[in-house]
Image: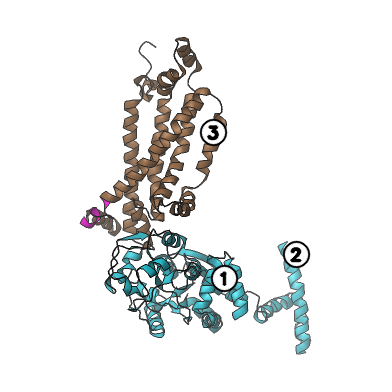
Chain colours: A cyan, B brown
Amino acid sequence: MRTHRNGFLGAILVVVLALLLTACGSGEETGTDNSTTTTSADAMAETTTTHAMMDGPTITIGSANFSESALVAEIYAQVLESAGFPVERTLNVGNREIYAAALEDGGLDLVPEYLGSALSYLGGTPTSDTAATAQALADAWKDAGIAVLDPAPAQDKNGVVVRQDTADELSLSKVSDLAGHDDLILGGPPECPERDFCQKGLEDVYGLSFAEFKPLDAGGPLTVAALEGDEIQVAILFTSDGVIAAKGFVLLEDDKGLQPAENVTPVIRQEIVDAYGDDLKSALNSVSAALTTSALSEMNRQVGIDGDDPEQVAADWISNNL
Amino acid sequence: MDFLGGVVSWFLSAENWSGPAGIPNRLWEHIQISAIATIAALLLALPPAMWLGHRRRGGFAAVSLVNLGRAIPSFAIMVLFVPISIRLGLGIGFWPSLLALFALALPPMFVNTYTAVRDVDPALVEAGRGMGMTEAGIMRSIEAPMASPVILAAIRVSAVQVVATAPLAALVAWGGLGRYIIDGFSVRDNVRVFAGALLVTLLSIGTDLLLGAVERRVVPPGLSPAAEVVPPAHG
């Protein structure tokens, strides 16, 4: 089967080559040896056809273990695939502690990152300034051989979310309005109590205190179900989460600027950038240029609430926006 | 060595021994949910299993049905029951976890009890009937003691499985020793993960030893494994 196919492919390539050579008017040079003809045709086809595989290392694309990260990773994967880069997907790897370590080890080559959280993970201090945070992240990751490409306008930050009835009853519109309501239960990812941009920051920066913290999931169905069912009254969800609008939850304004810039940004191993150069960078940067928070929320709604296939959602967005 | 040193200092740290996230409270939560699940399964499994074993029929269908419970992963039961539990006002962590552990504990107890009672020597049962024993009396005085080694072993196996599976409850916001594993994993604190796993292992072994001791006390001397090995003096 394999030889059969190769033979067929070879035949096509010979025809392509013949046409090219005729066009160039240099038929006499290579018409002598059939085997070398096929080889040079192979090389030519690879450089001229966009859908052929490029030579070079396979780009292993990973993501964090939540659907938005996997969706953006899928967009990267489809864009790179159609540009002819060899791509392998290892999505839903885990949380930052796990995928960032894999990126540094070389187990992963490319992941969609969130500027502020990544910088904070590396020990830096992110601000709400996107450019400054991106530069700081690039500096922090440089020595580990990781490059930070262009940040997208899309931001996904930790958002403090309450139900509409809680917001009405306690007249909440900003995070600082939660002060004094010590009887509320906070729910979010298990690592929240130990994170600056989660419970720790809410306590230190806003001076809030909660009756209890319930360890649930990272902006996932468990947290949403717990908030809906009044198991928790305050939830940590992602600002670009389609569920907030769909369920009529209220996203409280981060009035003290606790949350840093969290633009979605491709981070990639430098050796992959070196291997492929500007073509790779511009393919990924074109995704960033078009990706806005509203686009992300809409795709999140399609995947998370409408139950659409992430691959299809990614493909549709690419064909409409790139 | 650094890692082991970390584990030792984790166990020596005073803050890990007090408060809701301290070892005593987590251990208690773990024991609580495991014990309730095991005892509930015991109460629900034993009577019908003994009765079906006594009648020596209808068992195959029951065993097949009960074994379905084994085919559903515990975590799937937890996750599937979370929205239902919230709607019923039962909360998010405890009841879904309890249900999953209950479903895990029930099948081995049911199947083993049924089989053990069914396999009691029919001659003994007939002898009991010949002596004028009631059916309830036969079950109580012949079948239950004869089947007790297998039943107790099944309870022990179930309980150990439950204790070892209960850490999953931490995934749906319940406490227990699983919290150290899940929370430690989420911040990549391998020392905490290992300490939690170690505590779960120790509790599982402790459960096994404890119920083993109960087994030795409860099983009639003539039926204990030791009696099987040593031939009776009057051979």
Q: Position of residue A22 (x, y in %)?
A: 79, 86
Cβ–Cβ under 8 Å for marks 2 and 1? no
**Mark 1 highlights which residue?**
A87
Boundaries of the magenta span: B14-23
Q: Nearer the viewer, mark 1 or mark 3?
A: 3
User: Would you say B197 lies left or right of B114 here?
Assistant: left
In front here: A146 or B188?
B188
Element assignment for label 1: strand
Q: Position of residue B91 (x, y in %)?
A: 40, 53
Distance in Å between CA atoms under marks 1 and 3: 51 Å
Asked if badges 1 and 3 are on one and the same chain, I answer: no
Q: Which mark is residue A175?
A: none
Which corner quadrant of the image does residue A119 belong to? bottom left
Q: Residue furthest bottom?
A: A25
Q: Position of residue B32 (x, y in %)?
A: 33, 44
Q: Are marks 1 and 3 in contact (CB under 8 Å)?
A: no
Chain of the residue under the numbered disc 1 shown in the image? A
In the visual, does A42 lie left or right of A154?
A: right
Look at mark 2 in the image and give the residue it sits on: A4
Residue at point 34%, 32% (across, down): B212
User: Which residue corresponds to the image point at 42% horizontal and 77% vertical from the top-left?
Assistant: A262
